[in-house]
């Protein structure tokens, strides 16, 4: 596996070594020792989540706050997504900056999302299966979010707004300015 830290410090793109032959493929999707050696992080994942979505579904931008903040290791099992993270660490040089990457079931790349980051993704193919590991359990009272079309963040989702499918809950999320002024 190769690990590359991106410009949002503490975030990593992880590219596994995939072995393919006439039978299909095999790869190690997670190895704690290798992950810790490559990143220097001592993360212990306690919950795995999976979602299936249709093309055009946008989920996010979500995060948990305080003692329930979650680091995540995200990947696509089948299909593809435009994955977006936003640095919410007020003391960070990249506070309010975002990063996006296309993750898909072919390359098997993963993205490590640190605590105190918002996360969202736009589904690019029908029947996409998205998976993520969390280092803290879900806690509903700590759940927060930022509206996907926030003017301060200015995220380019690369799709016409009329093609997006969002939950009522995600359509009512506050702006970055309202959450972090």
Image: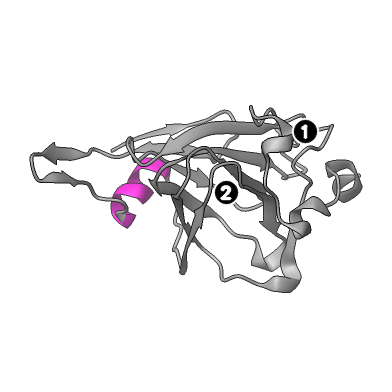
Total marks shown come to: 2
Circle nearer the N terminus (2, 1): 2
Q: Which residue is mark 1?
A: 153
Of residues 138 and 120, the one drawn nearer to the viewer in this rendering:
120
Q: Residue at x 70, y 72 (%)?
A: 140
Q: Secondary structure at mark 1?
A: loop
**Horizontal relation, residue 100 to residue 166: left or right:** left
- State the residue in front, 120 or 92: 120
In the image, residue 83 lies at what x, y percent? 55, 39
Does the magenta run of residues contain 37? yes
Q: Position of residue 176 (x, y in %)?
A: 83, 43
Q: In whole angstroms, how far apart are the C-alphas of marks 2 and 1? A: 18 Å
Please report the residue visible at 48 percent of the width from the left and 45 percent of the height from the top. Answer: 126
Position of residue 103 measured from the top left corner of the image (x, y, whole percent): 45, 37
* Residue 32, placed above or below residue 38: below
Span shown in magenta: 32-39
Q: Is residue 131 left or right of residue 35?
A: right
* Mark 1 burial class by Cα count in 10 Å: few <14, some 14-19, many 20+: some
Q: Main secondary structure of the magenta part?
A: helix
Q: Quadrant of residue 66?
A: bottom right
Nearer to the camera, 118 or 76: 76
Quarter of the C terminus within the rendering: top right
Q: Position of residue 144 (x, y in %)?
A: 75, 59
Q: Which mark is residue 114?
A: 2
Q: Which mark is residue 94?
A: none
**Is 87 placed left or right of 4 in the picture?**
right
Q: Which quadrant of the rendered structure holds the N terminus?
A: top left
| Mark 2 nearby-residue class (10 Å; few <14, some 14–19, many ≥20) | many
Reply yes or no: does residue 102 show up in magenta: no
Residue lying furthest left: 22
Label 2 element class: loop
Q: What residue is shown at x 65% (from left), y 30% (from top)?
A: 159
């Amino acid at each position: 596996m190769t690990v590359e830290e991106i410009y949002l410090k503490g975030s990593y793109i992880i590219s596994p070594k995939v072995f393919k032959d006439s039978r299909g493929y095999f790869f190690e999707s997670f190895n704690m020792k290798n992950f810790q050696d490559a990143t220097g992080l001592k993360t212990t994942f306690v919950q795995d989540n999976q979602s299936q979505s249709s093309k055009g579904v946008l989920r996010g931008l979500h995060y948990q706050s305080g003692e329930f903040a979650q680091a995540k290791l995200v990947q696509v099992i089948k299909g593809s997504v435009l994955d977006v993270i936003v640095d919410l660490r007020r003391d960070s040089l990249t506070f309010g900056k975002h990063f996006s990457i296309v993750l898909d079931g072919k390359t098997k790349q993963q993205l490590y999302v640190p605590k105190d980051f918002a996360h969202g993704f736009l589904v690019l193919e029908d029947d996409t299966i998205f998976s993520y590991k969390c280092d803290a359990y879900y806690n509903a009272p700590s759940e927060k979010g930022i509206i996907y079309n926030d003017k301060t963040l200015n995220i380019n989702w690369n799709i016409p707004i009329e093609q997006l499918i969002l939950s009522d809950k995600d359509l009512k999320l506050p702006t970055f300015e309202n959450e972090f002024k």
